[in-house]
Image (cartoon, rainbow, N blue to C red):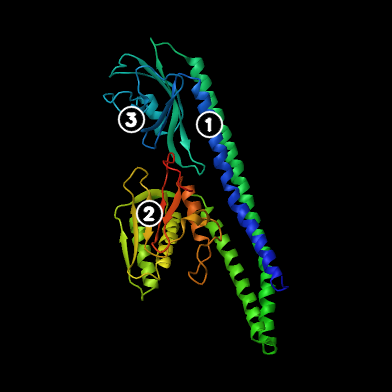
């Protein structure tokens, strides 16, 4: 290894370590939350009551029971109804005590209701629940337990014990989430500090290489001048990589600001901007109208900016280039960006979303190798997945979902 290339290799190792640390810590919180949910399910399995969870409109999206489940009630039939609506004929309006708690997003305990319709008419229902919030403080709905009482008998001890267990698990999750967020902030601060320290030797390498080229260039032969130019170019690329890494950390680490985002209009605007940046090209663009999602407007724009930018870039050498944005009509309702460009070999798909990973050379298609890593981080922060399908020379399609309750297939994420 030559003396001129050794500083760059050393700096590259440092930068790779920083990047691995920044992204590795984000996986900790989700794994811990999964373990807590598994523990909660084990606790519920020993009960004959059932557990329910709603969306923000108080419609049941999930219901699970313990041993045997409540007799005379199919839990699957509760989906799409209010937690107290055991039969479609019952009124969906919340009882007064429960409605007051929900309006103020407060917990409610042991609210007893009469079942007024259906096969369970005449029985009593007891509900307890608490509001759910994401790690960023976004209201997600309610979750709680329900008991179908027999002959009006109260089972207060069982309900209180289960509710206490749920409260304890939720408190543990909140505490661990706070520790995770603190660790992330500390690691981001560390990344800024290290990146600042990396710039100093880069400036030295670049500055002295420029001096050699300007003051001693005439004494070097053509090969020597070419070596010095490569040093200058490598230092510039590394400086650009540091800027890109820090920019990604700042953008994707910000708190989410939720609102309804018109993805179709955002995609149309971005396509117009990309087309205007290359006036000599003719690209057919198809945007499915009426697509929107709840999320952070700035970050979702960044998702489409990267995906559409890649579609334009990798179809630049294709005649009759075509770029599409739409949504699948099947179960997962995944959004997609499709092009008919260069494509890639699916054997290397696991490298797509790695930082500074590229499947095409810099001479073929310019780029930093950070765009898709940024997209994956944003999609995951919106509780979604992203994956790709492609063939060399036949274009590529990138799919992404938002706010999934559970993965429907095992696509790479």
Q: Residue at x 55, y 63 (%)?
A: 244
Secondary-structure class at tag 3: loop
Near mark 1 (Cα within 10 A), the count class, few <14, some 14-19 or many ≥20, is few
Q: In front: mark 3 or mark 1?
A: 1
Numbered marks: total: 3
Q: Which residue is mark 1?
A: 38
Nearest the viewer among 257 and 15 is 15
Q: Residue at x 38, y 57 (%)?
A: 337
Nearest the viewer among 32 and 94 is 32
Secondary-structure class at tag 1: helix
Instruction: Locate residue 92: give its quadrant.
Output: top left
Near mark 3 (Cα within 10 A), the count class, few <14, some 14-19 or many ≥20, is some
Query: Disc 1, disc 2: CB below 8 Å?
Result: no
Q: Nearer the N terminus, badge 1 or badge 2?
A: 1
Q: Nearer the N terminus, badge 3 or badge 1?
A: 1
Q: Is residue 248 above or below residue 401?
A: below
């Amino acid at each position: 290894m030559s003396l001129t290339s050794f500083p760059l290799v050393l700096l590259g190792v440092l930068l790779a370590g920083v990047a691995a640390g920044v992204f590795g810590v984000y996986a900790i919180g989700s794994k811990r939350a999964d373990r807590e949910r598994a523990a909660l399910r084990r606790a519920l399995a020993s009960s004959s009551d059932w557990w329910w969870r709603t969306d923000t409109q108080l419609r049941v999206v999930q219901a699970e029971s313990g041993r045997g489940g409540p007799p005379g009630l199919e839990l699957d039939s509760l989906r799409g109804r209010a937690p107290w609506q055991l039969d479609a004929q019952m009124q969906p309006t919340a009882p007064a005590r429960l409605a007051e708690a929900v309006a103020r997003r407060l917990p409610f305990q042991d609210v007893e209701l009469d079942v007024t319709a259906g096969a369970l008419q005449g029985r009593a229902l007891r509900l307890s629940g608490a509001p759910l919030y994401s790690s960023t403080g976004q209201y997600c709905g309610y979750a709680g337990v329900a008991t179908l009482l027999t002959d009006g008998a109260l089972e207060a001890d069982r309900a209180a014990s289960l509710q206490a267990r749920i409260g304890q698990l939720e408190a543990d999750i909140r505490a661990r989430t706070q520790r995770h967020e603190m660790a992330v902030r500390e690691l981001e601060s560390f990344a800024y500090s290290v990146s600042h320290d990396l710039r100093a030797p880069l400036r030295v390498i670049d500055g002295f290489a420029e001096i050699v080229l300007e003051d001693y260039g005439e004494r070097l032969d053509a090969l020597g001048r070419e070596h010095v130019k490569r040093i200058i170019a490598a230092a510039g690329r590394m400086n650009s990589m540091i800027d890109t890494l820090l920019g990604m950390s700042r953008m994707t680490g910000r708190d989410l600001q939720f609102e309804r985002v018109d993805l179709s209009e955002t995609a149309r605007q971005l396509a117009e901007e990309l087309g205007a940046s290359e006036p000599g090209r003719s690209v057919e663009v198809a945007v499915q109208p009426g697509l929107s999602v709840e999320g952070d407007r700035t970050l979702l724009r960044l998702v489409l900016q990267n995906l559409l930018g890649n579609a334009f870039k990798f179809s630049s050498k294709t005649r009759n280039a075509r770029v599409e944005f739409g949504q699948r009509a099947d179960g997962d309702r995944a959004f997609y960006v499709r092009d008919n460009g260069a494509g890639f070999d699916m054997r290397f798909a696991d490298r797509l979303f790695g930082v500074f990973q590229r499947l095409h050379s810099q001479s073929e298609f310019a780029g930093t190798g950070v765009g898709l890593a940024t997209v994956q981080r944003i999609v995951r922060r919106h509780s979604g997945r992203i994956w790709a399908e492609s063939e060399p020379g036949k274009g590529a399609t990138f799919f992404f979902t938002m706010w999934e309750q559970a993965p429907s297939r095992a696509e790479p994420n």
